[in-house]
Amino acid sequence: AQSVTQLGSHVSVSEGALVLLRCNYSSSVPPYLFWYVQYPNQGLQLLLKYTTGATLVKGINGFEAEFKKSETSFHLTKPSAHMSDAAEYFCAVSDRHSGGGADGLTFGKGTHLIIQP
Amino acid sequence: DAGVIQSPRHEVTEMGQEVTLRCKPISGHNSLFWYRQTMMRGLELLIYFNNNVPIDDSGMPEDRFSAKMPNASFSTLKIQPSEPRDSAVYFCASTARGLAGYEQYFGPGTRLTVT
């Protein structure tokens, strides 16, 4: 069974500082990996994903994440935080099926990002 | 594209009543997912469909929950009878073959309150 661990339910950074949100996963096969963002009272929006190929992936709003198989990690970073980045961030995994076909997502508990002015 | 459409956006009902949540996936998407979000349990997969066929309903909490997808453009999640512990935000998401990693697009959610 898959699982996702997000270290830190709340992370607070100053505006302009580096953002680092941690995600570790466990999966029996190399998974697809995702980061989603959720603003208050809204649905989830995809920030970025890793499927195959380059392990450093870039997403929207200046975010990027690096897939490290040896560490089973997929940490999310942004060089300089904006006030508008304040939101809930979810790391998620899904299985690759040998026969193809979509699979459900397993989510971490989420990290609430707070930006201090 | 209108995105994933869910209705109603808010539902308040009394314990014991039947509740039906509705979802219209993005046109052309062939997989549909229902998730539930609560403070205690976070985001949980309830059930998903590929090509209108239920693939995995192991996340459906009890027999009180049922889901259908009668065609490619419509799905329902029904709770009968509803209980206060069913209060949550319910999300529908869809994806398509050909999207790398089968990235899922989420609807705005239905906030259900059972009193």
Image (spheres, coloured by chain):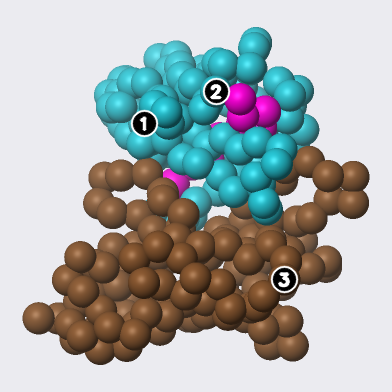
Chain colours: A brown, B cyan
From this viewpoint, which residue is outermost toward the right?
A99
Q: Amino acid at mark 3?
A: Gly
Q: Describe residue B104's horizontal placement relative to residue A17 as left or right.
A: right
Q: Chain of mark 3?
A: A
Q: Give the magenta range.
A: B28-37
Name above or below for residue B52 compared with residue B50. Answer: above
* Residue A106 image offset from top left, x and y in percent: 62, 56
Q: Nearer the viewer, residue A84 or B91?
A: A84
Q: Chain of mark 2?
A: B
The Cα atoms of the two marked residues, 1 and 3, are separated by: 36 Å
Marker disc for residue B27 = 2
**Residue at the spot x=40%, y=62% of the render?**
A60
* Residue A40 image offset from top left, x and y in percent: 25, 51
Name the residue tied to disc 1: B110
All told, the count of numbered labels is 3
Q: Chief secondary structure of the magenta span?
A: strand
| Residue mark closest to the camera, 1 vs 2 | 2
- For mark 2, give the secondary structure: loop
Q: Amino acid at mark 2?
A: Ser
Q: Chain of mark 1?
A: B
**The magenta stretch spans residue B32:** yes
Q: Nearer the viewer, residue B106 or B28?
A: B28
Name the residue tied to disc 3: A53
